[in-house]
Image (tube, helix red, strand yellow):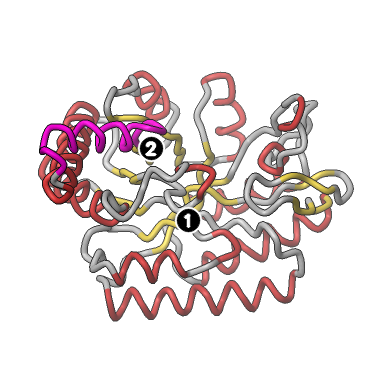
Amino acid sequence: MEIGIHGFHLDDVKYYEELGVTWCKWPGEFFPLEREERAGMAAAREAGLQVVMDLRTSGDALTKAWGVAMQETGGDEEAATVQVVEQVAAAAAAFVSRHKDLCSNWEFWGECYCPWVSDGVFNDKVTYTALLTAFYGAVKAAQPEARVWTGGNGTNMDPEWVIALLQDNCGAYFDVLNLHPFFISLRDLVVTSRHMDRSLGYMRERLQVDALNQPFAATEWGHPHTPERRQLRSNVIGGLLSLDYEEAVEWFERDLRAFERWGFEVVIVHELRDRRAAGVNEDFWGNYCGLLDLDVQRKPTFEVIQRWAARGRRG
């Protein structure tokens, strides 16, 4: 099981090297306008990191594309859906064709089921599963060796999104079942340990029956941790508690042992640094998941990741 880091910044290469991570991931937009990613990908590869690119549309791109398609098809919803899906697939194929010398792992729309992240862009007309199916075909045509990763989901290890994916007959249209296994509202180590094993076991059974027994991976994982437990803010559930530094070491170790046991290929840590923010965003939980604190001091979890990264490099 290899270890990666969320994001890539040239100023942080010394930390990536010290940690020994071998992967990185960040989001890239490809529809309707493509954001330039070649320079970043090339720099990451030069630093010895494999890249997973989280390809996604802009926030309101699908809504606008749907409106245009409805006008152009005279209000024919079925034809409008086909038009939007084909446009997205063509844009994905073009992006992959231009970057295939630098990347062969493509996540499609990370956290697509999170209401805050996706902002309702997926609906009963233009569904995530329809887009994933088209994305898969387009990417494989542009780069046959490519691996398509589902958009990471699954906070609190909830398997419902996997069930929905498979019920929509999408089991053959991804190569990696990608999780974002953050424990948001659960803070009991014993309870979450049992829940993690039950959930991963259930997902593995469903992949064996209704899909192609694809491997697990996680393109974002971690825990908010501060010197002492602290009440933090969530955009979805209202609030949650951070872990203190001692607890965080135990939780990090527990999670990584479970991921290894269940055959995760790659686990990407969210993230290297704590982030500064002002106003309402200051206490957002995602600001405190870093391995370095706001003063750029190493938290105890830095060494945990360092050890697991070395283990992953040894195979």
Distance from the alpha carbon under mark 2 to that under mark 1: 19 Å
The overriding secondary structure of the stretch rendered in magenta is helix
* Residue 200 image offset from top left, x and y in percent: 49, 73
Residue 205's disc number = none
Residue at (27%, 72%) from the top-left corner?
Answer: 211
Give the amino acid type for the residue marked by disc 1 in the picture. Asn
Residue 51's disc number = 2
**Highlighted magenta segment, given as a residue range:** 57-75
- Crowding near the residue tagged with mark 1, few <14, some 14–19, many ≥20 C-alpha atoms within 10 Å: many
Judge from the rendering whether residue 248 lies leftward or rightward of residue 178; answer left or right: right
Report which residue position mark 1 lands on: 153
Helix, strand or loop at disc 1?
A: loop
Q: Are marks 2 and 1 in contact (CB under 8 Å)?
A: no
Residue at (86%, 51%) from the top-left corner?
Answer: 229
In this rendered view, identify the residue nearer to me: 314 or 251.
251
Give the amino acid type for the residue marked by disc 2 in the picture. Val
Helix, strand or loop at disc 2?
A: strand
Q: Is residue 143 visible?
A: no
Was residue 252 drawn as part of the magenta stretch in this picture? Answer: no
Was residue 60 drawn as part of the magenta stretch in this picture? Answer: yes
* Residue 212 image offset from top left, x and y in percent: 25, 71
Quadrant containing the C terminus in the rendered view: bottom left
In this rendered view, identify the residue nearer to me: 67 or 128.
67
* Residue 111 image offset from top left, x and y in percent: 46, 49
Residue at (71%, 34%) from the top-left corner?
Answer: 274
Q: Decide which of tag 2 and tag 1 comes sooner along the chain.
A: 2
- Crowding near the residue tagged with mark 2, few <14, some 14–19, many ≥20 C-alpha atoms within 10 Å: many
